[in-house]
Image (spheres, helix red, strand yellow):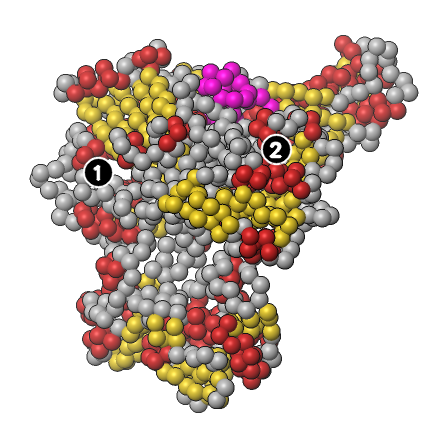
Amino acid sequence: MIPAQFDYVRPTTVEEAVQALRDGGDDAKLLAGGQSLLPVLRLRMADPSLIIDLGGIPELKGVREEGNEVVVGAMTSHYDVTRDDTLRQHVALIQEATKTVADPQVRHKGTLGGALAHADPAGDLAAPALALDAQFVIAGPNGTRTVAAADFFEDYFTTAIGEGELLTEIRFPKYTGWGARYEKFNRVAQAWSIVAVAATVKVDGGTISEARIGLTNMAGTPVRARAVESALVGQSATEDNVRKAAQAAAEGTSPTADADAGSDYREHLARVLTGRAVLAAAG
Amino acid sequence: MTTTENAPTQEIGRDRRRKEDRRLITGRTRWTDNQALTGLLHISVVRSPFAHAEIKGIDTSAAKQVPGVVAVYTAADLGADQVQLPCAWPVTKDMKAPQRPALAGSRVNFAGEGVAVVVARSAAIAKDAAEQVEVDYDELEPVLDMEAALADGATLVHPEIGTNANAQWVFDSGEAGSGGSVAEALQKAESDDDQIIVKRRFRQQRLVPVFMEPRSTVVDPSGEQLVMWSSTQVPHILKTMLALTLGLPEHKVRVIAPDVGGGFGGKIAVAPEEVLTLLVAQKLGKPVKWTETRSESLLTAHHGRDQIQDLTMSVTKDGTITGLDVKLLADMGAYLGLVGPGVPILGAFMFNAIYKIPAYRFDCTNVFTTKTLTDAYRGAGRPEATFGIERLMDEAALELGMEPMEFRRKNWIKHEEFPYTTVSTLTYDTGNYEAATDQALQMFDYDGLRREQQERRERGDVKQLGIGISTFTEMCGLAPSRVLGSLDYGAGGWETAAIRMLPTGKAEVVVGVSPHGQGHETAFSQIVADQLGVPFDDVEILHGDTQSSYRGLDTYGSRSLAVGGIAVVKAAEKVIEKAKPIAAHMLEASEGDLEFSGGRFTVKGTDKGVGIQDIALAVFAAHDYPEGIEPDIDAHATFDPENFSFPHGTHLCAVEVDTETGFVQLYKYVCVDDVGNVINPLIVEGQVHGGLAQGIAQALFEEAAYDDQGTLLSGTLVDYTLPTAADLISFDTANTTTASTTNPLGVKGVGEAGTIASTPAVVNSVLDAIRHLGVKDIDMPTTPYRVWTAINDAKGTAGRGDEANVASPGAGLGSTASDISKGDTQGGHL
């Protein structure tokens, strides 16, 4: 319960946060909602010398529309994501996935940007962000830059956010009218996903015209199930068609093995859950 | 005429909300960790990362340099390696008991064992400095598997005792004269065409009690009496044991268990950290606190269960049990806990359960391994036994081709046969298994769910339905002192209560049992209110401080009501008895003309009367009382039960098993429990619900797993998957009542019933859902991965000509354990 000693600052602007990162050097750590960092500190698996709390920066919070995009501030809480009307209308998949994150207390404290920057392969929000082709806006000493989801997730707990940088917002293209489903498989409700599948599909007259599928915990990073996506396009959304297409779900994955699941079981789950997720999204 | 308008309403049987909950739920109370004494120092224990290792050296110099550190001690500095922590239950005369120190001296025997202690001005500093203590270890081979530990040439956990076997405890009904010889029964069955023999091996995985409040101890050595606050279930036992273990004069020690946040058996202990806190406080002459982290708790507080059960039953083809043989291996872990070696032995009396079994043998070997020690966990020995017999009843019914409830019905004790003396020598006073079962079947819609199950099978649904039964009884209300004596237990089983009548008529009731979440304050107040005829709100229950409650044996084994509650009744009877001559004096009547009812003594046939609360004031004033009588109506009583109490019930569980993913979803859970007369139905229901959650968790969710180096893999609550309300369903609970005849309230225990009964009901239901796919057994917890693996491994085996198809009733007469354990152990090594 007792972390090692650290210094603490609470900047009020992104600029100040970037400055604090520069001042703190290698050993500084950003605190968003704290739902991953605080347990790590308590278990003394990390002992940063400086904690930079992003909770006091108003510009990092909230959801807004900008043309064909919905922009979510990195410090927007999971709870706010789940109840936002704009997201419900245009980016339903991220909302569906966020509803499954842990429990209400965690969803009130945890943030979208914090979860994505943490890049836990078993976390629930990276796969939907990848499937949705989200854009990640990163601020640093040289201003801001934007990274596509496909380039953002690099490895276990590793993203394109560089030293001295912080994630400020996530920009989602609009998927207005698409069906969405996050099919999560875990042992108990509050546990991490063993495997989960994020699927969003556009159905025109019973036929799937577009499909986007992201897989959680099937590799060190979220994985796009592109073979399934292309197999689905042009198919009528019947159980047989979808399940047949879903057979390709584990292609290109490299799932881990642990006490809760062997890698063969994870591959099997990816196929089963992809079928279920697509059917539900198309339903 | 006596006025009736003020007669108090009956309290017993009322759904009273718990009076203690406001302070407990809002946290406005004082837990041990809240004790903030002037000059308080904090300790942090340095623990071994290795399961088995020699300690070559400990360098404390860096830790001592950390600002705020007061001292860093190794075992020798404190004499902590010379301490022998007590085991109060030497189950056999030749039991092997290794020394259990408060800190390891030269060798560690489990990962998490303490090797040094840091004392500092704050808990944070102590923790920081603990990381600076350098320990040089020489690793030894860990001892992890019980069967391997007993093999010739096995590495010994404690070389000095020459074996990894702690004790072997045997009961044989043929030798005891309570039944026939199992050896003969099995021999006869083997050569009898009208009998079959069913053998199975079951595993009871290791569990962690996971009480909500982590353990904490504060010791203040500065007064005449040394005071210890501790988050314990057993303040009285702790006090006496500290005196005996450390050679302290018992009258110089006071132990206080303030509000305690759960225990489930996990706080029945004399913990090394309690002793360590005391030794440090004595050495420095200052108050000292130890509070564990959750991970420390999971790693080092005692675990529970962990058995291998080899069971053999002989049964006639028409379904009459003729013999039961039980062979157990029970994992003690690295040391013996306070009652650890006795826990599996409690199962000896429960494997025969509610059934009439003519020949029975129980043979348990306790084994040392290099793991955290095991000791009591909710049910302690009875859940293990109930799981074994209720799983075996299903397996035998399958092989016989009988409906599993019909098989049970055919063998259980009929209600008209009570009192009934069992093959394991217990006398069940009352019970009605038919009534509880009939009500449960009706609430469950057993026939309807069986039809639904059949329909799903015929359709080949992805989600298959399974139905599981557990018809259980248990022995609780620990315990008749004479019985404990015969089992070589180190104490009696009585309980004490005292009632202090205050001048204003209020009653302080001092009890020897020590609540840690059960609701004693409410239930006992209800009892006292009825007994003395005083308002519920005029009663205060005092507990947990050996200064006010100097005599008691604390709370475990569902004893608080069935033993402690009866002591309260007896004390109240004594108050009335002592008040009677004073009432007679006040009423100028003879004692023989008085009757006591509704809190008042009245003179028969008149309207003259005086209330017990008025008598309390008169006694306080003491201006006028009869000669030769002391002005005092306070009373103290000790109750030693003549028998255990035997709650029973029928639990029915339906689950949906997703055959594509292996996920098990609870579908319906019905239980009808007979816990005798009920003092507070709300508390009883709460106990049943919590018990069910814990028992279901053993079946589906929880396991304390170790890797091949002896490292605990479930060292956080991320890995030790406790279920929450989100993982459970609404339970349908009800009660039937046969009052116990062995105590004046007619009550039986309820604290452990749900935990004991539910585990086999759930596992039976999981197997029932997928047995037609060829699955024979799945180790607990039946995780999705294990269920999926079992289904996968069984593919193509269902109905194969070369082996028994036990899914078809009657098709698989006779089997051996090797059928079950061969090849497809379904996740035993996952």
Determine which of the numbered discs, if any, sits on residue B108 in the image. none
In three-dimensional space, the C-alpha distance between marks 1 and 2, rounded to whole angstroms, equals 45 Å
Residue tagged 1: B821
Confirm whether circles 1 and 2 share one chain: yes
Give the image quarter of residue A265: bottom left
Q: x%, y% of residue B43?
A: 60, 47
SS at mark 2 in the image:
helix
Instruction: Classify A283 as above or below B739.
Output: below
Location of mark 2 (residue): B235
User: In the rendered image, is residue A91 in sight?
Assistant: yes
User: A166 or B605: nearer the eye?
Assistant: A166
* Amino acid on which disc 2 is placed: Pro
For marks 1 and 2 on the same chain, the one whose residue lies earlier in the sequence? 2
Whether tag 1 and tag 2 are in contact, CB under 8 A, the answer is no
Q: Residue at x 69, y 40 (%)?
A: B285
Judging depth in this view, the residue of A226 and B341 nearest the camera is: B341
Relative height, residue B206 to residue A272 (above, below):
above
Residue occupying the point 58% across, 21% down = B494
The reply to whether residue B523 is in sight is: no
Which x, y percent locates residue A260?
Answer: 32, 54
The residue depicted at 33 percent of the width and 65 percent of the height is A217
Secondary element at tag 1: helix
User: Relative to residue B626, is residue B746 drawn left or right?
Assistant: left
Task: Inspect the magenta stretch and tell me whether residue B314 lies in it.
Answer: no
User: Chain for mark 1?
Assistant: B
Disc 1 residue type?
Ser
For the residue carrying disc 1, how many other residues have a C-alpha within 10 Å: few (<14), some (14-19), or many (20+)? Answer: some
Magenta residues (range)? B470-495
The answer to which quarter of the image holds residue B352 is top left
Residue B144 is drawn in which quadrant? top left
Q: Nearer the viewer, mark 1 or mark 2?
A: 2
Q: Is residue B794 above or below residue B194?
A: below
